[in-house]
Amino acid sequence: MATGGRLGVESAAPSTTVRIFRWGALALIAAVLVQAFLGGRGFFLADDDMLTVHGRVGDALLLVAIAHVVVGAVAFRRRQLSRVPLGLSVVLLVLVFVQLSLGYGSEDSRSAAAWHLPTGVLIFGLAVANAFLSGAVAWAPPGPPGGAR
């Protein structure tokens, strides 16, 4: 599994499967940002067409989350990905499904609408964490203050 380097993947050159997983992690982030824009404009400007597009992008986001878990499972099975990014992908898939249910349920329920926004924020945070842990975003832990060794 993780043999050094990042927590989520081996330190050797990443396989095609891992690269696809990383791009999927970035695609999830981008899609959630688009969702925030579409949902906000649709809600605050009372634009039903924008909310319809928001719903369709949410449907597509569920498909991306499913594909992300499948690719992650393949990479995990090949010992190219650790459990943490794969586990986060599964959690994201469940949350995207819940989010989609809340979104469609918010047409009839204020309670569902009230949970829709914080669930989206949680999804975004976990998607960013997954991108970092899978190596899609390069990072290094902070060094000592002032460059001291």
Image: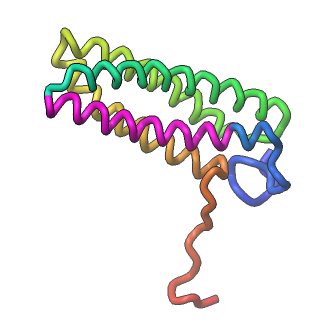
Q: Position of residue 77 (x, y in %)?
A: 81, 29
Residue 5, relative to residue 49: is it above or below?
below
Furthest-front residue in this view: 49
Quadrant including the C terminus: bottom right
Q: Which residue is at 22% across, 29% downward?
A: 42
Examine the image and state in which quarter residue 72 appears: top right
Q: Which residue is at 35% across, 23% downward?
A: 53
In reply to whether residue 31 is colored magenta, the answer given is yes
Residue 40, relative to residue 137: is it above or below?
above
Q: Is residue 117 left or right of residue 138?
A: left
Q: Position of residue 135 (x, y in %)?
A: 66, 52
Q: Position of residue 96 (x, y in %)?
A: 45, 24
Which residues are drawn in magenta?
Answer: 21-45
Q: Is residue 126 left or right of residue 144?
A: left
Examine the image and state in which quarter residue 44 appears: top left
Quadrant including the N terminus: top right
Residue 66, relative to residue 122: is it above or below?
above
Of 83 and 11, the residue lying toward us: 11
Q: Which residue is at 31% across, 38% downward?
A: 37
Query: What secondary structure characterizes most of the magenta part?
Result: helix
Of 138 and 51, the residue lying toward us: 51
In reply to whether residue 136 is colored magenta, the answer given is no
Q: Which residue is at 59% across, 90% downward?
A: 148
Examine the image and state in which quarter residue 24 appears: top right
Q: Position of residue 16 (x, y in %)?
A: 80, 40
